Amino acid sequence: MTDQLTYPDVVSLAVPFFIAAILIELLWITTQKRGGRYETRDAVTSLIMGAGNVASGIALGFIAWGFFTLLWEITPLDLGSSLAVVILCFVLDDLRYYWVHRFGHRIRWVWASHVNHHSSQHYNLTTALRQTWTYTFTFMMVVRAPLILLGFHPALVLFCGGLNLIYQFWIHTEAINKMPRWFEAIMNTPSHHRVHHGRNPRYLDCNYAGVFIIWDKLFGTFVPEQDDEKVDYGLVHNLGTFNPIRVAFHEWVGIWKDATQPGITLRDRLMYCVAPPGWSHDGSRDTSAEIKAKHLEKHPQDRGSAGFTEVS
Amino acid sequence: MPLDILIILVVVGIAGIAVLTHLLGLSKPKTFLSEAQARTAWLREFPDSTVTSVTLCASAQAALIMTQAGPGIVWAMGADSTARLLNGATFTATETGLTVTLPDYGAPRIALRLTPDEALLWTNHIGAAA
C-alpha cells in the first residue's frame, strides 16, 4: 500500500500568491473605481480569520488525520497515486465539498463554524480567507470517510481539498463580471459565488459548489446572478463587531444560549443545535425558507423565478 | 513552507494590507446622508418592522429608530451598517456620547458619538419607550 505517500501543503505554499492577488485587486479597485470595495477593519478581520484557520489546522489537524489514518488501516482498497486517480479524487472530493457546504448552511451546528465566512458585508479576495477556526468541532471530516474507504490515500484526499480551497480563492471578487459561457456552465465562478454570499431572499441557500457548479445544477440548488438584483453581501442579521474572536465563536455562543434556556423541551434543545439556522421553538425567528416565503407575500410576482422556484 | 517563514509572511502581509488600505482612505466610517437612508439601513436588517420615527445623530454615524417592537439603533460598521433592537441594553454616558451594551455576543457594544443634548434626548426617548 502507498503508506508513505506525501503531497505538499499547497495552501501554505499559496500564501504569497494570496497576498499578491489581494494587493493587485486592491490597487485595481482603487485606480479603476470599480470592481468591488475594501474597508480596513473588515479586511484585517478577514485576514486574521484566515491566519487563525491555518493555526487551528496546525493545532487540531491531528484529529482528522488520526481518523483518516484509522480508516486507511481498515480499508483493503488502495487506488494508488496515478494522475487519473488524482483527478478522480479531486472531482469526488469536490462532490464531498458540495455536501459539506450544503450541510454548513442547513444544519446550525455546522453553520456555527461556516457562518464567519459569510460575516463580511464586503466581497473581495480577503473574504475568501475569512475561514473557520472551528471546523474540527463540526465533525464534518466523516463526510470524507467514503473517499478513504474507497482507496484514496488520506494525503491525496487532503491535497485535493487544498487545491479545492485554492481554486475558490479567486472567485471571491467583484472585479470579474462573467467568464466565458462554457466556463460559467461547468465551473464555479465569481458570478455564481457572489450569489452564494448574498443575503437577498432570492439568493439564500444556493450555489454550494466548490469548483464545479454542475453539482448545484444536478441537485437543484443553482441560482444564476440576476442582472436586475444586485447581491447584498453579509448575514441576514449582520454582526456589530470586527473582533475576530467574536466572529469565530458568536454562533456557538448563540447555540449555547438557545439550547440551555429554561422552559423548553429536550427536542427543542436538540433542534437549536441541528435545525436550519433561524429555527426557534416559538417561531420568533425566520429560517431562510420563511424569509423567502415572506418575500413572496410582499412580491408575489417573483414566485417561480430564480431562487423562488421551490418556495410554497 | 517552514513555519517561521509562513508566520513572517502572514504577519507582514496582514500589517501591510492594513496600512495600505488605511493610507488609501478606506478606513472612513459610513455616514447616513439622511433619515431616509438610516431608515433603509434599519429595514435592511429588520424588513418586517414598522418604523415610527428616525432620529439621526449629528455625526451621521448612527440613528435611533423607534419601532412598534421597541427602540433600536442602526449604526456604522466600517463602510457598512448594522442594527439591533435595544432589548436588555444598558447605557453609559461617556465624554463623547453614549456607550450601549447589548446582551448580544455578536454585537456587544455600540459606541455612539453624540452631543450632550443628543445623549440626553436619546436616553429619554429610549427610557420613555422602555
Image (cartoon, grey):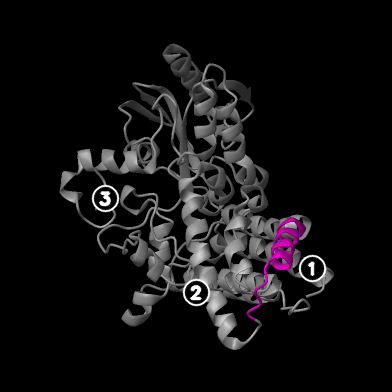
Identify the mark at residue B122; answer none if there is no mark: none
Location of mark 1 (residue): B8
Which amino acid lies under the numbered mark 3 shown in the image of this protein? Glu
Location of mark 2 (residue): A28
For this view, does A124 lie left or right of residue A205? Answer: right
Chain holding disc 2: A
> Is A77 contained in the magenta span?
yes
Q: Nearer the viewer, residue A277 or A42?
A: A277
Mark 3 lies on a secondary structure that is: loop
* Marks 1 and 3 share the same chain: no
Q: Can see residue B108?
A: no
Mark 2 lies on a secondary structure that is: helix
User: Of marks 2 and 3, which one's residue comes earlier in the chain?
Assistant: 2
Mark 1 vs mark 2: in front? 1
Location of mark 3 (residue): A310
Residue range in magenta is A62-79
- Vertical side of B96 occupied by B34: above or below: below
